[in-house]
Amino acid sequence: MTWKGYEIEIHDHFKRMFPNADISHNVTVAGRYSKADRQIDILIEDYVAGNRIRIVVAGKFFSEKIDVKDVEMFIGMLNDCEANKGLLITQEGFSKAAINRAHYDPIDIELDILNFKDLHQFQGYVGLPYNGKHGVVLSAPFGWVIDGTRRPNMLASLYQRGLTLEQAAGENREWMYVNLRSKDDEIKTFDDFLKFQEAYTLHDFPDAKIEFLRTVKRDDATIKLRVLDIKSYPTKEYTGFVDFDEFVFFCVLFTPEELKKKNIRKLESILQQVLPLNVNQPIEQ
């Protein structure tokens, strides 16, 4: 793949995700401070509450990790282009200094990874995790894969393409797992399930801090986003819930604090896109 093909892959992804937004590839914008035309790989523009929002996306097809200097150059361009948000995407990742620079800058900037490394066994972009007669159609978020290997309390896991679950959950500390709970005589409603989860958590971790955050919405189901702060956990635990008619789907995210913004966005994309599935017979995996 070439750098141009890499940019086109990123552009096509955002066109699929946001079909109603104005999304352009390889355009120029007049710099507010430089008074020069600034080249932009992907420009996303849309209206929110009557205000025009501008998002600048840069795709860097580098063979090494991006360092702090590249992030600072991108931040400078965002200011010059009067962008509301910036996305810097590369294939080999970012140095720790680059991650910190983006995280602590007042401008809204996210760092993400998209690579095309070979898939491992049981990895894919779409999965059908199920339990009993209920399941879901699950799509992997940008740059990630679904691992269909069943593990205790996990119907499937999700993490960056090119890694294994052990690598993602170990040094990277960026991964998710999914599960679902069918409604029955014990758990009749969504609120019953949330109360059950809270009681279970506080029984094992009495000092756990539980908070619900504002999140995305969908017309056909209720969504909740919860964060758990448990001292013995390496990161905070973010759980997204979707209340379907006969069961509750939930996806649990672990992420470093410096990368929580982009990873919560990945979690929310799952919550908006996941579809319920009735299983009438066993699915071969």
Image: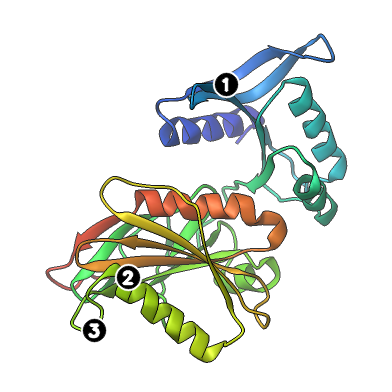
Q: Which SS class for mark 2?
A: helix
Q: Provide residue 283's location: percent of width, then percent of height.
A: 22, 69
Q: CA distance from mark 3 to mark 2?
A: 12 Å
Viewed as shown, does residue 160 lie left or right of 126? right
Up/down of 83 relative to 128, above or below: above
Q: Provide residue 128's location: percent of width, then percent of height.
A: 30, 62
Q: Amino acid at mark 2?
A: Asp
Q: Which SS class for mark 3?
A: loop
Q: Which residue does the numbered mark 1 point to in the structure image? A: 25
Q: Which residue does the numbered mark 2 point to in the structure image? A: 191
Q: CA distance from mark 1 to mark 2?
A: 45 Å
Q: Which residue does the numbered mark 3 point to in the structure image? A: 186
Label 3 vs label 2, nearer the camera? 2
* Picture quadrant where residue 256 is located: bottom right
* N-term mark: 3 or 2: 3
**Dot 2 surroundings within 10 Å: few (below 14), some, or many (20 or more)?**
few
Q: Which SS class for mark 1?
A: strand
Viewer-closest of 150 and 121: 150
* N-term mark: 1 or 2: 1
Q: Quadrant of the C terminus?
A: bottom left
Viewed as shown, does residue 70 lie left or right of 243? right
**Dot 1 surroundings within 10 Å: few (below 14), some, or many (20 or more)?**
some
Viewed as shown, does residue 166 lie left or right of 69? left
The structure residue drawn at horizontal position 34% and vertical position 66%, both measured from the top left corner, is 249
